[in-house]
Amino acid sequence: MLVPMPVGSAIDARRKNRWLTKFASYWSNPTRGAIEDWLDQFSKEDRDVAARMLDAVLFIDQAHIYIKFRTLLAALEGWSADPQQRVGRWAFVPFSGSAGESGDTMTHWFRSATGMTQKKYNDLFCYRSEILAKEFGPEDTIVLIDDFAGTGTQASDAWRDYFSELVADGPRVILMLVCATSAAASKIAESTDMSLHAGHVLSEPDNFFSNACVQFSQDEKRKALAYCERASRSDPKGYGNCGLLLVLAHKCPNNSLPVLHSQARKWAPLFPRRG
């Protein structure tokens, strides 16, 4: 989470313009009117905490995702753009299993970010259903690509239920993510044989409702929770109680506060999720 403006700061045109610039590349393209409508759902007394939450949102745009992918790839031991310099065979695979899911989007962006969109690189990319037929061995590397891990449960379950059987012959398996929480990183390390490489790692102070989060007072957290309960009765602190103020260019994770992304009878989000 970013450092918000001080309590009581004016919610003026300059501040709104900063939000507009910051969130401009979100897929639904939030407008000034959308921001004002979102703020209007808060009472006059609580609008300050709402504004400070927007200040604190960590927004990761597509350009930043590209930079992270290039940096993460360059740091992988044994990788080279020159096939003669690579150690073993390599495969880049969408972590999610269905077409159109986040892994597909991230793999497409990964190819663009790393300059591997040409046909000559096609053999480096495959779907997880093709892994077994390629007979990867101990000298080879499989890089699974996705956007985010909040609790680590989905990654752990996918490893247990699917990937562990596909890589029984022992290739190195890397999970490359744009962002992950430290809790997810720990769970992935404990319950899988994947090596996690994440562009951002969010820690306990990034959980809005945690005592480790000192950017907001307990009174502000109490006020915010009432609105989060209006937006989502089932996960008022975000899925897995992660309490994040995180938005990615293509989606807002459900681990983030529901006032940001949840559509409810009494709530309209600023960062709606697709579908």
Image (spheres, grey):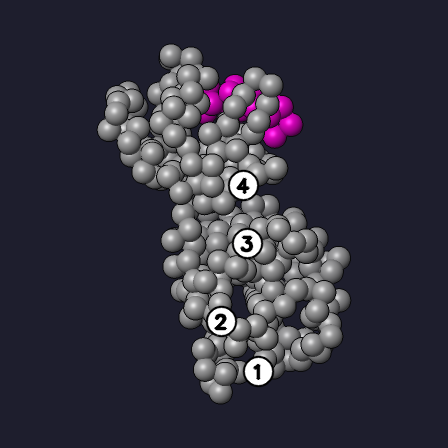
Answer left or right for 136 relative to 2: right
Q: Which of the two discs, 3 and 4, sits closer to the camera?
A: 3
Q: Which residue is mark 3?
A: 105
What secondary structure prevails in the magenta region?
Answer: helix
Q: Which amino acid type corresponds to the residue marked 2 in the rendered image?
A: Gln
Which of disc 1 and disc 4 is earlier in sequence? 1
Tag 4–tag 2 contact (CB < 8 Å): no
Q: Which mark is residue 118?
A: 2
Identify residue for label 1.
88
Query: In the rendered image, which quarter is residue 135 located in?
Result: bottom right
Quadrant containing the N terminus is top left
Front position in the image: 148 or 128 = 128
- Mark 4 to mark 1 CA distance (whole Å): 35 Å
Task: Please give left or right for residue 153 compared with residue 36 in the image.
Answer: right
Label 4 to label 2, Cα distance in Å? 31 Å
Q: Which of the 4 image quarters holds residue 53?
A: top left
- Let me know if residue 140 appears in the view: yes
Which residue is found at the position 54% from the left and 21% from the top? 267
Q: Give amino acid for label 1.
A: Gly
Question: How many numbered callouts?
Answer: 4
| Crowd class of label 4 (few under 14; some 14 to 19; many from 20; radius 10 Å) | many
Write the start and end of the magenta stretch as one range.
Answer: 221-235
How far apart marks 1 and 3 lie (CA) works out to 26 Å
